[in-house]
Image (cartoon, rainbow, N blue to C red):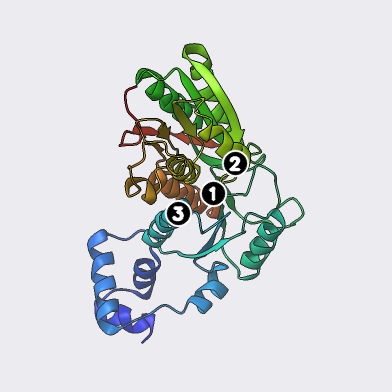
Amino acid sequence: MTLKDVAKAAGVSLASASYAVNKTGSLGEDTRAHVLNIAEELGYRQNLSARATRTGRTGAIGFVVPDMTNPFFPSLAQSVVQRARQNGYSVFVTDSEGDPDQEMEVIRQLIGRGVDGIVWFPVNDGNSLAKINADLPIIVIDRTVSGFECIQADYSDGGRLAAEHLVNLGHRSIGVVAGPLDVKSMRDRCQSAEGVIKSRANLAFTVENAFATELEKSVADAIVSKSATAVFCGSDLIAIGVLRVARAAGLTIPGDLSIVGFDDIPWAEYCTPTLTTIEMPVDEMAAEAVDALLRKIDGESDSNRRVVFNVNLIVRESTAQI
């Protein structure tokens, strides 16, 4: 079944049929819908290889994240895939296992597969692509990498909301468990929280942990020292690790220790007790990242553009009045 057959059956020109199936050109919505219905009835499927040869585009983009074992990233990937699909694109999703060298390699592989562009969630704020000489549209999400258009959330405001929530509950000795501080988005949320705590309470400690539920000894020691009645964690994974260690040490949550996370991953709503956290606007960030990439593919570019989305405090069971 060819496009010419679709045009004939629909009673339109070959150009109009092409506009309809490729979602291009000037065509009325009723006509477009009619052509697509006929194409579906006839079982027409586009020859993507032929289209790539003709247009220079494959209709596929890449999405690179640091770690697919972190439940934040599958949720984000799903939103990216859905938005891309709405625009007629398929998505190659891959992770770099938290390794900048591996990150460079998987991006090389995506380029080799001929993707039209990449949405990139870097391992950190370093530009691991500096050694790759490729003129490919790329949009950065979450991180701050010089020379790339960036889609982010208001991390500083998230840290402020978390700390103010704990202070307003009456906590006066509050600890901070940061994620890796080589990432600006992490520094922003933790420094903002620390600023609020120092101005209105006592900062019991600041310790650093990987993006994981397994806690470093220094972090576990700080939690069980009972020097803080509340803790702000730089990510939900870390917060769940804190919750587990605290309970193993005989602390009740939130009776002895209130905990706030950051990200609002799916696990946050299902752990016990449910986790108070800062909600990241995942769907909105994903949609804007895909839209920005498609604009860039079409030749619209602003490497200095930075889009920042608002965040929200989600109050659940892991925090309480002291």
- Report the amino acid beneath label 3: Pro
- Report the amino acid beneath label 1: Ala
The residue most toward the front is: 250
Q: Which residue is mark 1?
A: 212
| Relative image position of residue 223 (x, y in whole percent) | 52, 34
Which secondary structure lies at badge 1? loop
> What is the quadrant of the C terminus in the image?
top left
The relative height of residue 155 versus residue 139 in the rendered view (above or below) is: above
| Relative image position of residue 244 (x, y in whole percent) | 45, 45
Kindly report which numbered mark, 1 or 3, lies closer to the viewer in this rendering. 1
Q: Which residue is mark 2?
A: 209
How crowded pointer 2 is (Cα within 10 Å; few <14, some 14-19, many 20+) is rated as many
The relative height of residue 49 versus residue 214 in the rendered view (above or below) is: below
The relative height of residue 106 versus residue 222 in the rendered view (above or below) is: below
- Report the amino acid beneath label 2: Asn
Q: Which residue is mark 3?
A: 71
First in residue order: circle 1 vs circle 3: 3
